[in-house]
Amino acid sequence: MKNILNILSFVCMFSCGACSDDDKALGGNTDGITVGNVTVPDVTYYSAKLKVEIEGSSTSILKKGFCYSTVPTPDLRDNLLEVQGESTVLESELTGLEEQTTYYVRAFATAYSGEPVYSEEASFTTQGSTAADKLADYVAPDYDDDYTNISSWTQRSRWNLANVHDPTVMKAGDGYYYMYQTDASYGNAHAAHGHFHARRSKDLVNWEYMGATMNAAPSWVLEKLNAYREQMGLDPVTQPQYGFWAPVVRNMGNGVYRMYYSIVIDNFIANGRPSVEANKDGSWGERAFIGLMETRDPASNVWEDKGMVVCSSSDKAMDDYWGNNGNYQNAYFYFNAIDPTYIVDTAGTHWLIYGSWHSGIAAVKVNPETGKVDALEGANPPAPWALSGQYTVNNYGKRIASRAPNNRWQGSEGPEIVKRGDYYYLFLAYGALDVEYNTRVVRSENPDGPYKDITGTEVTNGKEAYPVVTHPYKFDNSYGWVGISHCAIFDDGQDNWFYSSQGRLPKDIPGINSSNAVMMGHVRSIRWTMGEKNDAMNDWPVVMPERYGNVPQDLTISEEELIGDWEFMQLDGNHNGQQFTSLTLTLGANHKLTTSTGFWKNMSWTYDASQQVLSLNDGNIRIYLQREVDWEATPRIATVVGAGYYKDSSGNWKTNWMKRLK
């Protein structure tokens, strides 16, 4: 599907408000220029060829071309197709048009010394299309994943999804998807250029860089930090080292958009100095804060700060902040106030979910009007430590998920919560972000739990959750990707769901300096399990193994398309690096699998085209299919990919990823 206007024949598109109805010379003569009648010799479902002849000296023409609209009498204030060159016979093509739509077009020429001269109006109606037409005309994204040559700040207009980390995505009322992120970029290109950088897109493939949403840390952060330090009997921090991390953005549906953001203070608690080796004093690092910004116009990228929502809190005594000498299992903070996510439940209650490592993920109610935690507002809010009985976990939230019991260094962070059907789904990032980062998902009928994984086991007080949703991987003919987690989950309003995260290139790729620091924004489609033999396996999200490329989905995947070779891999969560064990499966016309691996050899396969589900091993293994881009092919092309979960004979949960090879 053509989602943006591609303009050919040395053409650019813009709008102009310089002319009014009173200064339009219709088919007239200005400086001896006359514009003939427009002909439209060829029209398709998304394009139209245009031709017109201009009489007069080309040297007296400032600009010329076509203006068009879906309403009559288009002028330079509408869509404009400017044609360059000296020829006075203009031939060009409009593309990216809506199908079965009537367009009105006029040619124009503007003299250096006069007003624009217009032709008579012509009109045409685009054709209808078939699903096969759209798929045949599809062109895959061609931007390079190694963006190091355009990674600098001066090249930001070309970034697209380059330099994206910890993205959060929402669809706004203007039809755009807006994306915001952690301050992380290859070579620290963002440094000194603001924080929580923004992008927007209409098609989730082509992204416009918009700039920072925050110019500097709000003054309340240091004020609040030093107020706490004063209560603790500590000197104020005078050289705060800020980290601007992991926002979450939400369209509240009432014209208001909220962004919760994390600001980390990277100083030691005891001496207040920056957290570098020379300043180590045996105390833990300072607390983090979650703040709130709001806007009514995300296109403006102007946000109003609303102040603190919550901060890192400890169940220990106020002065029990020592022990940062490798004793990570018993860290000072109970909840770490970073990585917020946000949801409004079916009863209208607003929830902030947050947390990282330490004791796990917390859920706390917030006031719908203010977006703040009522218990932490006012003149004397409960202190974020155990002091005279003031601190209770419930003031700062209750734990809803953790990876390991009684361990505050458990490699779980980056929660994201969404509601679909009967369940609230909580996505979690596991591991270190440089390589092993992977995503798990659990679900509950309530936003504050209890959450269970696909085995039916609660994760509140410590559980290695399954299924594995994404994981470092490597298809053939590529370097693959690592660090794929800390996700945003969002939909288009039509029950089409998407997963977005960063992906990093692996370490030590020849010819790419610091290749593991190359971070590209990834967007992937989600399908949801259905019709499984075990009802407990239904309604789980499966994320496609290849990135989203806006491939047309109208044409049902046929059984004939499945016959042939597939690249196959399994993700099991027990691998700290990439999954290198891909193999080739051949789906035969006799409905048998052919492969060199014994387990899959001669396994039967069937296909349900109505659900686009491939079943293996008498339906015990189900793969949910979708059309996506083969990003490893040269050139990139549309193909069929699939994903699904199953439990093997040893009781281990596996995630299967497949890609049809062309």
Image: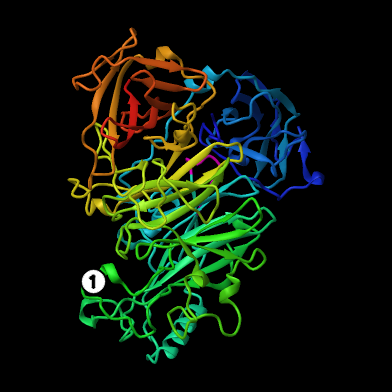
User: Relative to 261, is 589 on the left or the right?
Assistant: left
Residue at image mark 1 = 327
| Residues shaded magenta | 199-206
The image shows residue 375 at horizontal and vertical percentages of 58, 74
> Count of labels shown?
1
Q: What's the magenta bit mostly, secondary-structure-wise?
A: loop
At 40% from the left and 75% from the top, the residue drawn is 314
At 29% from the left and 46% from the top, the residue drawn is 482
Placement of 378 over or under 30, stated as above or below: below
User: Relative to 404, is 301 on the left or the right?
Assistant: right
Quarter of the rendering containing residue 593: top left
The image shows residue 581 at horizontal and vertical percentages of 21, 33
At 52% from the left and 72% from the top, the residue drawn is 395
Placement of 595 over or under 432, stated as above or below: above
Q: Which quadrant holds the N terminus?
A: top right
At 57% from the left and 66% from the top, the residue drawn is 293
Q: Is residue 200 magenta?
A: yes
The image shows residue 352 at horizontal and vertical percentages of 53, 61
Disc 1, SS:
loop
User: Relative to 73, is 68 on the left or the right?
Assistant: left
Placement of 461 over or under 64, stated as above or below: below
Q: Type of residue at label 1?
A: Asn
The image shows residue 175 at horizontal and vertical percentages of 62, 45
